[in-house]
Amino acid sequence: MARAIEGRLEMLEQPVASGAGIAALRQVTEQSTVPVRVDQSVGGAASVLEIAAKHAAHGISIKLAPCGGIRHAQEMN
């Protein structure tokens, strides 16, 4: 799908179900010609580090409520 819409999209957001795991996310990221950003896969600082370490996405959108508020969000930044 990403190849079909290449050049018309800036980024794909959360292209796999949040429970699909980092491996599934990384597979999509590796095969996509469009940058991938995650949000629902982020549950805390540890998940941000894992996503970054495994190059499972090109970007991360940190949302306050799911991560436990502004203090926890700042820890992830």
Image (cartoon, rainbow, N blue to C red):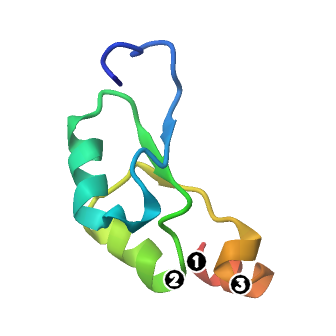
Which part of the image, by quadrant, shows the N terminus? Answer: top left
Mark 3 and mark 2 lie on one chain; the one further toward the N terminus is: 2
Is 5 on the left-hand or right-hand side of 64? left
Percent coordinates x, y for residue 75 in the rendering? 62, 84
Residue bearing mark 2: 45
Residue 68 bears which disc, if any? 3
Q: Decide which of 50, 14 is in the foreground and name it.
A: 14
Q: Decide which of 66, 10 is in the foreground and name it.
A: 66
SS class, disc 3: loop
Percent coordinates x, y for residue 42 in the rendering? 52, 70
- Going by the numbered disc 3, the residue's amino acid type is Gly
| Classed neighbour count for the residue bearing mark 1: other residues with Cα under 10 Å, few (<14), some (14–19), many (≥20) | some
Cα–Cα span, label 3 and label 2: 11 Å
Q: Decide which of 76, 65 is in the foreground and name it.
A: 65
Residue 23 bears which disc, if any? none
Taking the spot 42% from the left edge, 43% from the top edge, the residue there is: 36
Judge depth for marks 1 and 3 and give the one in front.
3
Labels 1 & 3 near each other (Cβ < 8 A): no
SS class, disc 1: helix
Residue 76 bears which disc, if any? 1
Which part of the image, by quadrant, shows the C terminus? Answer: bottom right
Mark 1 and mark 3 lie on one chain; the one further toward the N terminus is: 3
Labels 1 & 2 near each other (Cβ < 8 A): yes
Taking the spot 51% from the left edge, 21% from the top edge, the residue there is: 9
